[in-house]
Image (spheres, helix red, strand yellow):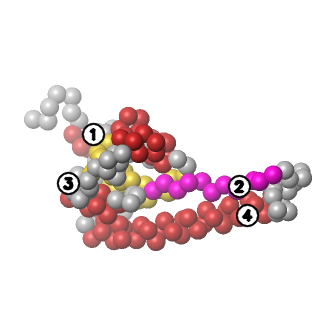
Amino acid sequence: HRGRGSKGISGSPRAKKMAGEDEQVVLRRIGVALDADANYVFDWTLKNLVRKGDKIVFMHCEEEPRPVFVGVAPPGLAFAGMPVSTMAVSCEQERHKQVDHYKEFLAPFIYKADQAHVPHEAALLRGDCRDALVDGCKELKIDTLVVGSRGLGAVKRAVLGSVSTYCVHHCHVPVVVVRHSDHTVHKG
C-alpha cells in the first residue's frame, strides 16, 4: 500500500527523465554546497542521503569579480587610464579563471560520484553565497540542500553570518547541515 494520494514514482510530478543510454527517473535533485568542508560533506551525502535514482548537483559560490574604482575618472575611462572596455575584458578573463578553477576543484567530486554511479551536474553560482544558494535551489529545482558547518561561535556567527543558518531560514527546500566529526565549536 503506497499511502493515500500517492501516485508512485513514475506518476510523481517531481520525477524527471534523464537522457542517457538507459532512461531512468530522477527521484530527487540533491544540492551539495561545496566549500572548505566539501570533502566531508560530499562523503557524508553519498553515505547517508543519496539513494538510487537521485542526482547530485554540485553548487559552488564565487564572488562576482568587480573592478575597484578609485578617484574620479574622465568619461569613458575607468581608473589609471584604463578604458572601460578593457575593464570589461579583464572581468571576463577573471570569470574564465574562476570557471577553470572550479573545474579543477570539482574533479575529485566528479570522480567519486562516477565511482558510486551517481548522476551529477554542477553549477557555479555568483554573488553572496547565502543568497546564491537560496536562489540556486529555486533555479536548479533542488529538492534537498546539503551544507557544511564551520562551527563558528556566537560572536563570529553574528559578525560573519552563517551560510548554513541563512539557508535553513530562507530556502524553500529542506536543508541538511553536516557538521564535521572533528569540528569543535569555537568560542567567541
Residue extending farthest to the front is 188
* Amino acid type shown at disc 4: Val
* Amino acid type shown at disc 1: Gly
Q: Residue 68, labelled with which disc? A: 2
**Residue nearest the observer in this picture, 90 or 31:** 90
Which contiguous range is marked in magenta? 60-71
86 on left or right of 31 = right
174 on left or right of 137 = left
Query: Mark 3 = which residue?
Result: 48
Q: Residue 11, labelled with which disc? A: 1
Q: Residues within 10 Å of mark 2 (few under 14, many from 20)?
A: few
**How far apart in space, not on screen, are marks 1 and 4 (Cα)?**
48 Å
Q: Do labels 1 and 3 touch, CB within 8 Å? A: no
In the image, is residue 72 part of the stretch drawn in magenta? no
> How many marks on residues?
4
Q: Quadrant of the C terminus?
A: top left
Q: Residue at x 82, y 62 (%)?
A: 80
Label 4 secondary element: helix
